[in-house]
Image: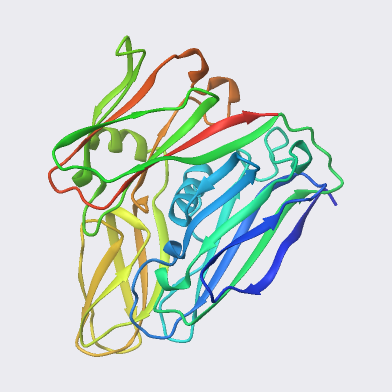
């Protein structure tokens, strides 16, 4: 068999919040790691999106960081790499699992022979997962963690490197002001994710100008209003869609979803009552109002998962077409924050790390 799925970390109790360190000592070459986190809800009332339960996932080799993103960033990056939405439901009901399966991709596609993670290239690679069940779902009172790997088996490729995904910068924005971020210049740059997630806000409520400049404004490869940038990028990717299961309340309930821009919602219920969806413009939540408590299944479609907008460089399948920032002495990303900004902003880079 050319490929197989290997268990890295068997299903283990993760009720206590902690950082789990897992040795990556496989002799097989890894195309993708899958981290599964299951929280068991104790109420019917959602408190936050399940992806918030994973605050950081890292692969380190001593002081060398080979992967570093949180759960939301990992889900968003996976979507923009594969154009595939979540393959399972989000369930906010009491005593049900809030499933969370996050794909850590090392290639342009699953089983990419050119880009994959070879543990043998490093001294002591470790996967570190920081989790806390209380940060998402409906007040989970228990949780479990599992890690598997999609590896090459009888087929033995010779990858020349892997995709290095890393949260590069995080800061608290100031309304109606500019923020300049000094970008890395060590490896080819395939993609930047700009995450600006704040309750009820759209991405353009938070950021309304984006500029990239080289060598002290000698060259400006990107200078755009937020809305025009969003419009030019999002037509390259399909809508993000998901199914969310919950119980309505007599009154209103906030339900947390993944799409954060242009959300469209359809609710099916187990009774004859009709829920009213107070359609939020963005921010990863929808307010559902009903006249009785009843089971509901909601289909959500929209854009910008978890408030992450990608800036993609060149043909995403052609390694030679990516942004060669190694020839640039100084690369700056400048963002202008709108008046309604809140929360934090995270900058995530995806680069080609060669062996």
The quadrant where residue 354 appears: top right
The quadrant where residue 298 appears: bottom left
Q: Is residue 91 visible in this depiction of the protein?
A: yes
Q: Nearer the viewer, residue 296 or 45?
A: 45
Q: Residue 83, image x and y in percent?
A: 49, 47
Answer above or below: position of 347 versus 34: above
- Going by the image, does 13 lie left or right of 87? right
Identified at 19% across, 46% down, the residue is 205
Identified at 38% across, 59% down, the residue is 258
Q: Is residue 324 visible in this depiction of the protein?
A: no
Q: Nearer the viewer, residue 128 or 324?
A: 128
Q: Quadrant of the C terminus?
A: top right
Identified at 40% across, 71% down, the residue is 244
Q: Nearer the viewer, residue 225 or 301?
A: 225
Answer above or below: position of 213 versus 176: above
- Going by the image, does 128 lie left or right of 183? right
Number of labels in the image equals 0
Identified at 31% across, 60% down, the residue is 284
Q: Residue 117, image x and y in percent?
A: 70, 41
Q: Residue furthest top?
A: 218
Q: Residue 108, image x and y in percent?
A: 60, 38
Q: Residue furthest front?
A: 63
């Amino acid at each position: 068999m050319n490929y197989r799925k290997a268990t890295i970390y068997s299903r283990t109790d993760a009720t206590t919040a902690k950082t789990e360190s897992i040795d990556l000592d496989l002799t097989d070459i890894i195309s993708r790691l899958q981290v599964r986190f299951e929280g068991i809800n104790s109420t019917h009332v959602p408190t936050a999106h399940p992806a918030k339960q994973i605050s950081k996932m890292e692969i380190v080799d001593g002081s060398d960081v080979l992967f570093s993103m949180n759960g939301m960033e990992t889900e968003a990056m996976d979507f923009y790499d594969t154009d595939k939405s979540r393959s399972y439901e989000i369930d906010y009901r009491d005593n049900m699992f809030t499933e969370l399966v996050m794909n850590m991709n090392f290639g342009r596609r699953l089983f990419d022979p050119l880009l994959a993670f070879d543990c043998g290239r490093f001294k002591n690679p470790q996967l570190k997962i920081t989790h806390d069940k209380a940060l998402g779902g409906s007040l989970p009172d228990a949780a479990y963690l599992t890690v598997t790997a999609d590896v090459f088996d009888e087929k033995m490729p010779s990858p020349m490197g892997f995709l290095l995904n890393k949260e590069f910068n995080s800061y608290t924005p100031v309304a109606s002001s500019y923020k300049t971020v000094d970008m890395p210049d060590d490896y080819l740059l395939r993609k930047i994710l700009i995450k600006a997630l704040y309750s009820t806000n759209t991405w353009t409520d938070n950021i309304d100008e984006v500029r990239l400049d080289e060598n002290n404004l000698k060259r400006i490869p990107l200078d755009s209003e937020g809305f025009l940038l969003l419009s030019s990028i999002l037509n390259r990717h399909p809508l993000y869609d998901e199914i969310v299961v919950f119980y309505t309340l007599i009154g209103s309930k906030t339900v947390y979803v993944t799409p954060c821009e242009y959300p469209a919602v359809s609710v099916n219920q187990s009774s004859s009552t009709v829920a009213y969806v107070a359609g939020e413009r963005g921010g990863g939540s929808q307010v559902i109002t009903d006249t009785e408590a009843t089971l509901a299944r909601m289909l959500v479609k929209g854009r910008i998962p978890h408030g992450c907008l990608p800036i993609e460089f060149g043909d995403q399948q052609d390694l030679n077409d990516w942004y060669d920032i190694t020839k640039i002495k100084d690369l700056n990303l400048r963002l202008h924050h709108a008046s309604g900004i809140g929360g934090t902003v995270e900058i995530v880079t995806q680069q080609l790390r060669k062996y």
